[in-house]
Image (cartoon, rainbow, N blue to C red):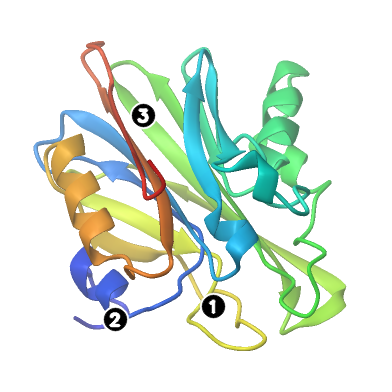
Amino acid sequence: MSIKGINSIEELLSSNTYPGRGIMIGKSADGKQAMIAYFIMGRSANSRNRIFERYEGGMRTKAFDESKLEDPSLIIYNPFLQRENIDIITNGDQTDTICNALAAAKSFEDALMTREFEPDAPNYTPRISGINYYADNDFTYSLSILKSADGDPSVCNRYFYRYTPRAGIGHFIHTYECDGNPIPSFYGEPEVVTLPNTAEELAEVVWNNLNADNKVSLFVRAVPLDGGEPTEIIINKNN
């Protein structure tokens, strides 16, 4: 597919050994559900030693083997938090920043203007964030990326994207363009992808096309727009 066109998830993931952490948000093919997918990958033993754990109101990353946990500062966080009629998904502790800002009647954008990329030189990993706003049997969503200026840590560029959902269409943003040393940050606008009908289908296509050595965990959430019960799937490589 053209870079500016609509891409298949299979093609984007299977051709990239290390997109890092990734967020997909959009509407199911039948137009009935809001869909979220979030995955994490890892190259180091510390990054790979993780699982997703759901709890009331959110989800956390957790060390699979606590005895092997090294520096937790950038790998242990809440990727997913809920507020009334709002879902927040991010790749770091900015999830809490966004949630707290909304509680103070501030916006998604206001919250992220106070944050920047991760302090993990020389990669300066971008912070990626997404949010769903539910209302009137539908939803809107936004994505954001905060990243250094072409690897210059003295500058943080902040990008925000707001979308009106279309059936079968999602937007995908990830931390890294590809593998490397240092790892190059994601470049350009979020990629447009086709989405299936169900959470099960989305989980299968994402998990099966992530690099087998580097994938760690996946979270998928599908929210019926008619008010039905959401479907959630967590897959942890470490079981």
How many C-alpha atoms fall within 10 Å of the one at disc 1: few (<14), some, or many (≥20)? some
Q: Position of residue 177 (x, y in %)?
A: 50, 78
- What is the secondary structure assignment of the residue under circle 2? loop
- Name the residue type under label 1: Tyr
How many C-alpha atoms fall within 10 Å of the one at disc 2: few (<14), some, or many (≥20)? few
Task: Measure how far apart labels 3 and 1 are at the Cα level.
Answer: 27 Å
Reading the image, the residue beneath label 3 is 139
How many C-alpha atoms fall within 10 Å of the one at disc 3: few (<14), some, or many (≥20)? some
Give the residue displayed 27% in from the left and 55% down from the top: 207
Residue situated in front as seen by the camera: 44 or 59: 44
Task: Measure how far apart labels 2 and 1 are at the Cα level.
Answer: 16 Å
Q: Which mark is nearer the camera, 3 or 2?
A: 2
Reading the image, the residue beneath label 1 is 187
- Tell me if residue 142 comes above or below residue 188 in the rendering: above
Give the residue displayed 26% in from the left and 11% down from the top: 227
Reading the image, the residue beneath label 2 is 15
- Name the residue type under label 2: Ser
Q: Which mark is nearer the camera, 2 or 1?
A: 2
Give the residue displayed 53% in from the left and 58% down from the top: 48
Are the residues flagged by discs 2 and 1 in contact, CB closer than 8 Å? no
- Tell me if residue 163 comes above or below residue 30 in the rendering: below
